[in-house]
Image: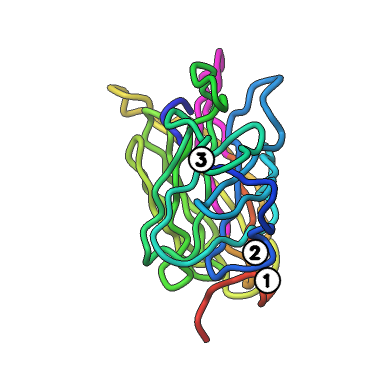
Amino acid sequence: MRHLLCLLLLIPCLASAQSKGSRTCRVLFLGAPDGAPEKLQLFDGSASQEVELPRMNLSPVYKLPAGPLVIRMLTTAPAKPEAVSPDAPKAAIPEAMAEFYLLVSNDPANKIAPVKLQIIDADPAKFKKGQMMWFNLTPNSVGGQVGTENLAMAANSKTILNAPAAKNGDYNVNLSFRTPGDERLNPLCETKWQYDAGTRTVLFVISQEGVRIPRVLGFPDYREPEETNAKP
């Protein structure tokens, strides 16, 4: 999780960016240790807002202005933009990116805000309702059956899987993994998941400290029509 990043900043006297803007994001603090912050301030260069840093679900949808941005994360709001430290965690948002996930990871070395930031593009034209965005953050290869779809992921890779079922309801999941240098298949999970055609899902395969078997974490992203930037 150390290689993941994310960032935000804030200004208390300015109106909340959640009430205006044409770009959206949701936040996730993956692998947050005990004592890590549960909320921080997100600053977009002209306005700020407090954002939640959930561990086991995606945050509410936050709105940000259009155009190229550099966002920053702080523990408290600065009195003015010029007061923001250049060492604060930050991330650049390209002008064309209208929807993204802000992935936060722990960084106790940063004295401004103890986090790192990573931007994940969530363009609804590329990541559609019903699809699954997978991240394998382990040194193992991972694969198997996800409903009607076949999953095959190399170590430290990303893929988007099409809808695993033709209609809403339960579907079978049977996944295995291979450790580096060993061709034997090891069981990862065999279960049933639920499909919702109106929901996108972001999934991470992560290593567990002191445990040989990786863990699969899934985060559904359902949005009301006013919370998405998808074009009709």
Kind of residue sitting beneath label 3:
Leu
* Left or right: 205, with 17 as reference point: left
Regarding mark 1 in the picture, which secondary structure is present there?
loop
Q: Where is residue 17 drawn, in percent x and y?
A: 63, 59
Looking at this view, is 216 or 166 the one in front? 216
Q: Amino acid at mark 1?
A: Asn
Residue name at image x 42 percent, y 58 percent: 160
In primary-sequence order, the first of circles 3 and 2 is 3
Q: Which residues are magenta?
A: 201-216
- Choose the circle earlier in sequence order: 1 or 3: 3
**Dot 2 lies on which element?**
strand
**In magenta segment, residue 208:** yes
Q: Is residue 30 above or below residue 15?
A: above
Query: Does residue 157 appear to the left or right of 103 in the view shown?
Result: left
**Label 3 crowding class (10 Å Cα cut-off): few <14, some 14-19, many 20+?**
many
Q: Label 2: which residue?
A: 195
Residue drawn 65% across and 64% down? 195
Q: Which mark identifies residue 7?
A: 3
How many numbered circles are shown?
Answer: 3
Label 2 near label 3: C-beta < 8 Å? no
Check the image and report above or below for 222 versus 146. below
Establish if 68 lies above or below 43.
Answer: below
Residue of label 1? 168
Residue 65 shown left or right of residue 3 in the figure:
right
